Amino acid sequence: MIKCVYPGSFDPVTSGHLDIIERAAAMFDDVTVAVLVNKNKKPAFSAQQRMDFIKRSTTHLKGIQVDSFHGLLVDYMKKRDAQLIIRGLRAISDFEYEFQMAAMNAKLAKDVETVFLMTDISHSFLSSSMVKEIVSHGGDITGLVPEDIKNDVIKYFCR
């Protein structure tokens, strides 16, 4: 069985992220969505909240686990005994950075491959940063985040 990891900040998980998770779940039997805990970043939501958002948004999918990690992704991959990294691409501009990361990960762990999935065109403009900006100004985030978490995201920014 091929084990996959879809890493990211997911601060918060967006409809674009969910699109990638759903398609990865359709292709692979074992997909871990791994929330990156980066001590140099100040996320809006805790790792536990982000994991909860992902769990609630993926209840309809089989073979999905949700976890968190810090440090090098390749070390986490070894811990999970995973072979494939799933990365989503929205635009050509994402590819350059993601290609460099894939090359470095391949250098650090020869047995790990990266698979790139293009997000659905309807989500190609979407990022967690944009969602946070829109909601912090009272904008409508319907369709930008999974419906299961929308009210929690709004509530957080409207306190």
Image (spheres, grey):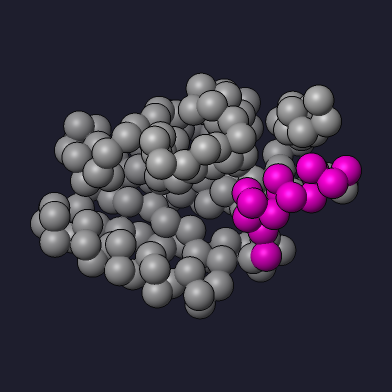
**Of residues 64 and 14, which is closer to you in this image?**
14
Residue that lies at the very extreme toward the bottom in this rendered image: 92
User: What residue appears at the point 39 percent right and 30 percent down from the top-left corner?
Assistant: 68
Examine the image and state in which quarter residue 82 appears. top left
The residue drawn where x is 48% and y is 58% is 88
Q: Is residue 92 above or below residue 37?
A: below
Q: Is residue 134 magenta?
A: yes
Give the residue displayed 47% in from the left and 42% down from the top. 41
Q: Is residue 39 visible?
A: yes
Left or right, 42 with reference to 28 = right
Residue 22 vs residue 47, the one in the foreground: 47
Examine the rendering and report whether any part of residue 58 can be seen: no
Q: Which residue is drawn at 44% across and 29% down?
A: 66
Question: Residue 42: image x %, image y %?
Answer: 52, 38
Q: Is residue 83 above or below residue 91?
A: above
Rendering quarter of residue 107:
bottom left
Tell me the magenta residue range: 125-138
Residue 50: percent from the left, percent from the top? 55, 30
Q: Position of residue 55 (x, y in %)?
A: 55, 26
- Report x, y in % for residue 147: 76, 35
Task: Between residue 128 and residue 19, name the one nearer to us.
Answer: 128
